[in-house]
Image: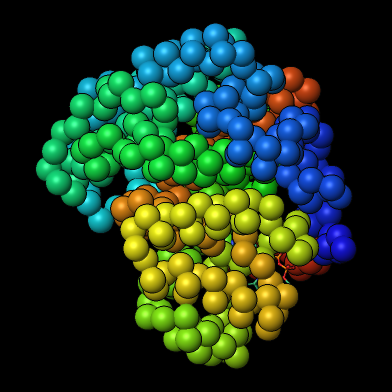
Amino acid sequence: MAKVLSGAGLRGQVAGKTALSTVGKSGSGLTYRGYDVKDLAENCEFEEVAYLILKGKLPTQDELATYKTQLKGMRGLPQALKDVLERIPADAHPMDVLRTGCSMLGNLEGEHSFDMQQQVADRMLAAFPSIICYWYRFSHDGVRVDVETDDNSIGAHFLHLLHGKKPSELHERVMHVSLILYAEHEFNASTFTARVCASTLSDMHSCITGAIGSLRGPLHGGANEAAMEMIERFTSADHAEQEMMGMLERKEKIMGFGHAIYSESDPRNAIIKLWSEKLAADVGDTVLYPVSVRCEEVMWREKKLFCNADFFHASAYHFMGIPTKLFTPIFVMSRLTGWAAHVMEQRADNRIIRPSAEYVGEELRSVTPIASR
Ligand SMILES: CCC(=O)SCCNC(=O)CCNC(=O)[C@H](O)C(C)(C)COP(=O)(O)OP(=O)(O)OC[C@H]1O[C@@H](n2cnc3c(N)ncnc32)[C@H](O)[C@@H]1OP(=O)(O)O
Ligand SMILES: O=C([O-])CC(=O)C(=O)O
């Protein structure tokens, strides 16, 4: 049954056109340029999907190899950017680091013409894992990592920089799947932010910096971190159930559940849940995965609320040894493709986005001189 889409938050309003994705349409729940996300997650690497989203078609073997080589060559960071990253304290939120990193990159390598948009998007795709890991390793371990790795994928590059060693095949595959699942999602809040910014004919770095700020909130991308903070407090499935019942009674919001558009399930959940289960077996987990499953059961039984893409990402990332505060930055590393493609789409058929407001303030009145107020 489709969700009734109306009311506050612009729900149900068509705010523009897109050829990039469909969300919650009958049949396959999520498609990128006509391909079901499940199909893409089963059969593709993230770089193929990034190419699809940014350049409009799935690459051939040769095109993919050339694209990956090109991205590999763009992983380095200018010294001035490294200097800025070294000044950001260890207790900063990594999403704020990425926001600053993206903005600084725009100062150093600005988009001077829209002809550069593809190149600027590719550069960010290659540089964001370097930015986040350079800062993380410097501020937490006092190490200046060499960000120019020869890893064959963005996900492997990220895990290599983070852990100081190449990831296992399993972890690299999970990163491909995760980055594919997060890559694009129509007019969600952060993408809409990017499109509003693009509609003023602003530069790509400004659009992406704004989008990072929108994704950071716990009602959007920040939910994967909030979900992790919740599930790690539970010591067993029964304990999880008991605590969740209390939270529901107190009408607390439970992060990682519900969705603005989907009504019965988020198609990305079943996919990442399966990988979380595999990772749980790989690390011998007997707590976090069963806890997560019980949370899912309780929320459906009590509220008919389902896990969104963020919920099982929490345990999956945790099993790969990724610190919780880096969860949402990984979302950025992926969603960047959707954001940039939306910016390009907006520019190709632009009118400044400027809705109207319903005025609910005072009627017209005159100013009382300050001495008489
Ligand atoms: C993957 C990337 C994403 O951004 S997915 C979303 C990530 N965010 C979260 O997980 C945060 C928790 N979820 C929420 O806050 C909402 O479900 C979000 C996603 C913001 C959607 O909001 P909205 O469209 O307003 O929800 P709704 O109209 O379906 O709400 C109906 C009633 O159910 C409630 N509800 C909803 N979600 C939760 C939840 N997670 N925990 C507890 N209650 C929830 C709403 O408050 C609403 O209740 P009521 O009718 O106002 O009494
Ligand atoms: O579409 C939304 O509102 C949020 C979401 O799931 C996403 O951005 O992936």
Inspect this view and state whether residue 177 appears: yes
Question: Which of the two residues, 107 or 297, is positioned nearer the viewer here?
Answer: 297
Location of the N terminus (image quadrant): bottom right
Question: Which of the two residues, 191 or 151, is positioned nearer the viewer here?
Answer: 151
Q: Residue furthest left?
A: 142
Inspect this view and state whether residue 100 appears: no
Q: Residue at x 39, y 24 (%)?
A: 152
| Number of on-image labels | 0
Q: Position of residue 313 (x, y in %)?
A: 49, 55
Q: Position of residue 165 (x, y in %)?
A: 23, 37
With 118 as the anchor, is 152 left or right in this view?
Answer: left
Question: Which of the two residues, 306 or 220, is positioned nearer the viewer here?
Answer: 306
Q: Residue at x 72, y 61 (%)?
A: 265
Q: Position of residue 193 (x, y in %)?
A: 62, 42
Q: Residue at x 41, y 81 (%)?
A: 236
Picture quadrant where residue 286 is located: bottom left
